[in-house]
Structures are given as C-alpha cells and as structure tokens.
Image (spheres, helix red, strand yellow):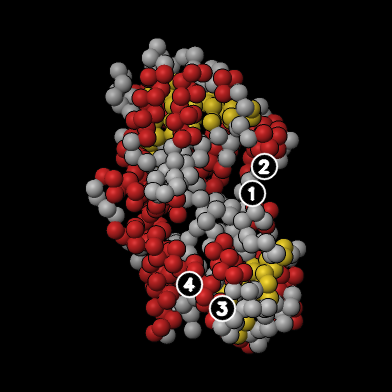
Amino acid sequence: MRIAMVGGGYVGLVSGACFAEFGADVAIVERDPKKLAALHDGRIPIYEPGLDALVSSNVAAGRLTFGDDLGAAMENADAVFIAVGTPTRRGDGHADLTYVYAAAEEIARAARTDLLVVTKSTVPVGTGREVARILRQTRPDLTFDVASNPEFLREGNAIDDFMRPDRVIVGIDRSGPDGGSRAQSLIEQLYRPLTAIQAPIVLTDLETAELTKYAANAFLAMKVTFINEMADLCEKVGGNIHDVARGMGLDQRIGSRFLSPGPGYGGSCFPKDTRALTAIAQDAGAPTQLVEATVAINEARKTGMAERIITQAGGSLVGKTVGILGLTFKPDTDDMREAASLPILARLHDAGAILQVFDPEGMAAARSLLPDGVRYCEDALSAAQDADVVVVLTEWNMFRALDPLRLRDAMRGNAIADLRNIWSPDLMREAGFNYQSIGRP
C-alpha cells in the first residue's frame, strides 16, 4: 500500500514512520525548507525518543521518503493523509483550519485517480464534511472517499502509542455510492498489523470521530486540573496528595494516570483542544461548562505558581537569582508550546529575578519565547549555582538523581520550589533546604 502524508511535523512524521514500519510505502510532503533539509540529511527536527532510529531504518529500506512535491508523493497512492497544523484561531478559540482546507484543495488538484483522503490532524466537528465538499467541488471528475483518523500520541511515548494503541478511531463518510466500503477496506488493510495484536479499531462516522479526540483530551485535562485542586486542598487541611491520588487511582473506574499534581497542563494538545471544544459547544448551543472552568482554572494556576515562588523567596525577587530546572511542558520532548514555564518565568522576570535555566532538550526552542537576559546553562548544577531559589518545572529523570548535598553546596540560598514533587520532603529538609512541593506536608 502506498500513502502520501501532507505535513512532516510531529503528527505527520511519527505517523508516517510508523506506517512505513507496518510495511506501507510512505511519501511525506514537507514544505518547510529547513525541516526538509534536516530530514534529507538524516536529522530529526523534533525530539521524540526512538524516532531517529525508526526513520533511519525505514528510509534505508526504501519505504519512507521526503519531498516538497505533492503530485510526486501522490503518484500511485491509495490514500493521502492530512497532518497539518490546526492552531488556535486568534480571538475566538476555534481551531484555524486554513492549512487543512488548503491541503484538501491541493490534493484535489494534484489527484490523477480516485483517492481516499484522511484527516489525521485534530479538527472540529464538520471539518470532514467540508473537506469532502472541497475535494468534490474542485475535481468533480474523480471519486474521493473521506475519513477522519485522529491521532492519540503522547509526546515522549508516541511510537509506542502508535504501535500498541489503546484504540484507533476512524470516522468514514458513508454518503458515497459504495457506502464507504472502499475507504473501510483501505483503512483495515493499513491497520492490519494492529488488528493482529487485537488493538481495538473503532469504526464510526466523521462527526463522532472528530468529537472523540476533543472529548478525550478535554476529559484528561479536567482530570489534571481536578488533582491540582485537590493538591491545593491538601495543603490547607494537612493531607498528602500522593496518597489521595493513589487512593483514587486504585479505583478501576478512575485509574491512576493523569493524577500527578503540578503547575498546570500545557503542550500542543490540551490547551488548544479544550479551547476548541468550548468554542464548538458554544456554537452548537450546548456549552461545556466543566471544560470552560478547566481552561480558566489552568491558566490561573500558572500565574499562581509564580506568586507561590515569590512568597517562598520572602516576598521579593529583586536582585535574587532563581535556578530553573526544566522548561518543556513535560519530559522526553523538546516541545515548549503552552509550557507552564513560559508565564511563570515571565512573571518572575517582571518581579526582578535573575533567571538561569537548564533543560536537556528544550532550550533551543525556549530562547525565542523567554524574556531577554535569561542565562542558559549547561547542566542542572550550573543552573543552581549561587541561586537563592531553585524551581523544578519539568520532571526530567536526571533531576531526580541530583545529589541534595551537591545541590545545596551549589546554591547561595536554600529555597526549593518543587512544582513536580520529584524529591522526598524529608530528605530535602534533612539536607538543609527550605523545601516546598505540591500538596504534601
């Protein structure tokens, strides 16, 4: 089977490499000259564990290619996947579908035969129907099958998520002459390796598939926000949020994942998708009040964390040095999109702090996003050198392994704001730190 993937970003590159690993011939179309040059040179423009080896092996096997010519990529293709960005549209929270619709029109113009066109991007309800309309209006001489196949990839674990998924969701437009049977057959052929390991393949309609992606991410965002609020309550009443989370998570109806307290969710999915879902619901006349509250609480939490740090530092950061451990929104990625570090560091900078930071993967992306004057350090201890306060913002494993005594010797002050609960309160206080974490005594 041959497929073309429009977009070589996170979703397109991971999905394309995994489809190639399944045995498909995959041509990825990337129009960013820098990204394309990097891919041709064997350099992966994003950080994702294992992706470099997966891409390299499939390029060597001849199953994975890169280019900027959509027509060439679609030559003899059975299906074309759209994996372009859908950023938040300014002003109203809706997803910006400019790139999706432009890709659909370009696909139609370049097509030489009947095709299956699949949206892999996260798109609002109704997008698949509009893609179908654009395709058929642009090329009425061809028959286009349309499907929605949203991705559920966690950054830092994307390859395993693709290869061993909890489920695969596929919405098929069944309004065509064959009732979508050709589209279903191609999808089943493409995902046959997952059927062999009994991964659930959920076949549904376009609208349901589109909504499922938003609903899943919004529910997880609410779960994160709920445990953060419970952590705040623990601090007021003397509870321990880790024990609360464990007690909740052992209930099989709830589960233990996404019950880790922190400074607020970020990344490329949760913020964008919760905003888009609230906009979709408002337009449909069915407001999602829980999701709206989640968005507001999460934004307020990030600025609240900055105030917490200032208070721990004695009420003022003027002239004080703050060492920052971690910048990315989560470990095992270089993604800085909507990271909690951005508003927190902006507030600390405005409060007069001297900021020195370290992140093992995110500093290149962070430079254009953080305030001027930030010092970028070569390791964690360098970020802590002569610091009055050290703040943990991302739970990279390398930070867990830091020797408390070496950290104490590097610092000028003794305040630790552990916003990811990576260290033992007892051990850190025994080492002489004024240690504060989230939701623990």
Residue annotated with mark 3:
310
Q: CA distance from mark 4 to mark 2?
A: 36 Å
Q: Please say whether residue 165 is visible from this viewpoint.
A: no
Q: CA distance from mark 4 to mark 3?
A: 10 Å
Q: Is 403 or 277 nearer to us in this picture?
A: 277
Badge nearest the viewer, 2 or 3 = 3
Q: CA distance from mark 2 to mark 3?
A: 39 Å
- The answer to whether mark 4 and mark 3 are in CB contact below 8 A is no
Q: CA distance from mark 1 to mark 3?
A: 32 Å
Occupied quadrant, residue 144 = top left
Q: Tell me the amino acid under the disc marked 4.
A: Gly
Residue drawn 62% across the image and 64% down it: 326
Q: Tell me the amino acid under the disc marked 3.
A: Ile
Q: Which label's residue is closer to the chain start, 1 or 4?
A: 1
Q: Tell me the amino acid under the disc marked 1.
A: Tyr
Residue 401 in the image: above or below residue 40: below
Expressed as whole percent of the image width and height from the top left, the position of residue 175 reads 29, 24
Occupied quadrant, residue 145 = top left
Label 4: few (<14), some or many (≥20) within 10 Å?
some
Q: Which label's residue is closer to the chain start, 1 or 3?
A: 1
Mark 1, secondary structure of its residue: loop
Residue annotated with mark 2:
44
Expressed as whole percent of the image width and height from the top left, the position of residue 231 reads 43, 75
Label 3: few (<14), some or many (≥20) within 10 Å?
many
Expressed as whole percent of the image width and height from the top left, the position of residue 83 reads 50, 36
Residue annotated with mark 4:
304
- The answer to whether mark 2 and mark 3 are in CB contact below 8 A is no
Residue annotated with mark 1:
47
Residue 413 in the image: above or below residue 53: below
Label 2: few (<14), some or many (≥20) within 10 Å?
some
- The answer to whether mark 1 and mark 2 are in CB contact below 8 A is yes
Occupied quadrant, residue 361 = bottom right
